Amino acid sequence: MNVFRNGVGKAQGLLNKMIGVLALQGDYERHSHILDLLQLQSMEIRYPDELGMIHGLVIPGGESTTMTDLMDRNGFYKPIRKFAKDHPILGTCAGLIMMATSVPNSRVEPLGILNIEVDRNAYGRQVHSFTDQLPVRLDGRETQVSSTFIRAPKITRIEAGIEVICEYKGNPVAVKQGLHMGLSFHPELDNVTLFHDFIFNKQLDNKLSPKFHAA
Amino acid sequence: MAEKGSFDIKVGLAEMLKGGVIMDVMNDEQAKIAEDAGAVAVMALERIPALIREEGGIARASDPEMIRAIQSAVSLPVMAKVRIGHFAEAQILEAMEVDFVDESEVLTPADEHNHIWKHDYKVPFVCGCRNLGEALRRIGEGATMIRTKGEAGSGNIVEAVRHMRQVQSDMKKLTVMDQDELMAVAKEMGAPFELVEQVAKLGKLPVPNFAAGGIATPADASLMMQLGAETVFVGSGIFMSDDPAPRAKAIVNAVTYYKDPKKLAEISSGLQSAMKGLDMSEIPEGERLQERGW
C-alpha cells in the first residue's frame, strides 16, 4: 500500500496533503515515483470513495478504452467530475484523453474536464513514438524538458478557458485550464517533476483547498 | 532532433500496458470483442495455442493481411508473434508497424541456438522465460518486456506459477548477495553480469514483467498479479471458453482488483465453463512449448 508512503512528517506545504493516482490501469507506479521524488504523500485510487481522502488526482497513461470501461463499471464518472470542481487533476496521455470534452471514438467516454478535443494515437503507432526536448511556459518562465510521446494523442481543438503551455511542431501538447493540466506526453517516464510540482505543490498550496468528501 | 526506437521508448509502451490484459485474437471480430471487453492490447495470431496443440504442423508468423485487418478494426496496440530466431519475420512485422513483437515459443522455432538481436529494431519485443537467467538473456538481446512462459494452450496455471515463483525467488536471492558473489551467479545463470548487478540493486527486472501461459479465470489473473506479474496475457483462455465476452470483461476487472477477494467473488460470479484444459501429465515432455528457447 502506498498510503503514507513518505511518512506524515515529510509532506511539504499543506499539512497532511495527499495526492491520489488513479490505479485502474496504466503507468500509475511511475507517477507515484514522481510524487515520491517531490516528497509528496500519495495513494493509489481504485475505489470512488477514496477520492474523499485526497487533495489532488493524477490520471496516468495507459489505454483510454480500458480506462473508460473500468471507470464506467466501477462508478467513477460522477465522483471524478464532482472532485474536479474544486481539486486539481493532472492527466498524461490516456489521462489527457479522459480529461477532454470530445474524443472522436465511440469506445471512449471522456470526463469533460478540459475544454479540448483530442484525437487518439494521432502521432502514429509505436515505431513512431519519440523523445524530444520541449520548451514549457509555466510559473512565469520557460523551461526545457525531456518529453516522451508513446502512441501519443493530439489536441485537435482548443476552446475557451484553455491556456497552452507547450507546443511541439505547431501543435499544442500541454494545456492548463483552471486547476487542471493535461499533457500529450509522459513526464513520468523521464523523471520530470516540473508539472506535478506546479499542480500539487505551488498551485495547491496557494489554494489551500478544503478536503473533499465524495459522499 | 527527436529520438525514436530507444530502449527507454520501447519500455515506455510496456509501462502503459501495466495493470491490463493482453488478449490473443484470431480475427478482427475477436479483436473487437477484446477491445469492447477492455483489453489493453491484442495479440494477433492465426491459431491460438490450444489449436496449435490440437492441429499440429509448423506454426509460423501470421498472414500480414490478417494482421492488417486487426490493425484497422481496433485502436489498441496490436502485437504479433514471430518464431524464435526468425529475424526476417520480425523485419516484416516491423515494416507493418505492429506495436509489439512476441518472439515466442508458441510458434515452431526457426533457430535452435540464437534468438533475434532485438536492439536493432524500433519495434519493441517481448519474450518468454522460465527463470531469471533466461529473462536476463532476453533483456540482454534487447527485449523490453518479459513474460513467464507457463504452458501455452494448456488452460493450466501450474507452469506459469512455477515460472513466476522461480523468477521472483531468483531475484530475491540476488538482493541479499555480496557484490563478490554476483559474477559466479551470472556465470551459473548464463546471464549478462551488468543485468545481474542491476537486479541485485533494484530487486526487480529492469523491464516490466508480465504473466502468460495457462490463465483461464479471474482468480488465475489475481493469483499471477499477487505473485508479482504486472499485467497478464490471456491466450486460449478467452476464446476457448463458453463465454468469451463476459469472461474477458471479468478478467480485465480482476487484474485491477486483484487484491480484493470480495470484489473478485462478485467478478467471478455467473460465468459459464472455463476452457477444459490439460493436466501436465497429458502433455508429453517433447510436446511442451516451454522447452523451446535457449
Image (spheres, coloured by chain):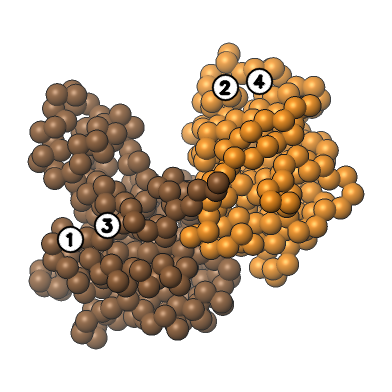
Chain colours: A orange, B brown
Q: Are marks 1 and 3 in contact (CB under 8 Å)?
A: no
| Residue A171 position within the rendered picture, expressed as x and y whole percent measured from the top left | 73, 52
Q: Are marks 3 and 2 in contact (CB under 8 Å)?
A: no
CA gap, disc 1 and disc 3: 9 Å
CA gap, disc 3 and disc 4: 50 Å
- Decide: few, some or many residues near mark 3? Use Cα within 10 Å; few <14, some 14-19, many ≥20: some
State the residue position of label 3: B117
For the point 67% across and 30% down, which residue is it?
A143
- Disc 2 marks which amino acid? Gln
CA gap, disc 1 and disc 2: 46 Å
For the point 51% across and 71% down, which residue is it?
B34
Question: Do the dots labelled 1 and 2 sit on one chain?
Answer: no
SS assignment at label 2:
loop
Note whether residue B18 is visible.
Answer: no
SS assignment at label 1:
loop
Mark number, residue B114 = 1
| Residue B98 position within the rendered picture, expressed as x and y whole percent measured from the top left | 45, 68
Q: Residue furthest front?
A: B1
Q: Are marks 1 and 4 in contact (CB under 8 Å)?
A: no
SS assignment at label 4:
loop
Q: Are marks 1 and 2 in contact (CB under 8 Å)?
A: no
Mark number, residue A39 = 2
Note whether residue B132 is visible.
Answer: yes
State the residue position of label 4: A16
CA gap, disc 4 and disc 2: 12 Å
- Disc 3 marks which amino acid? Trp
For the point 56% across and 77% down, which residue is it?
B73
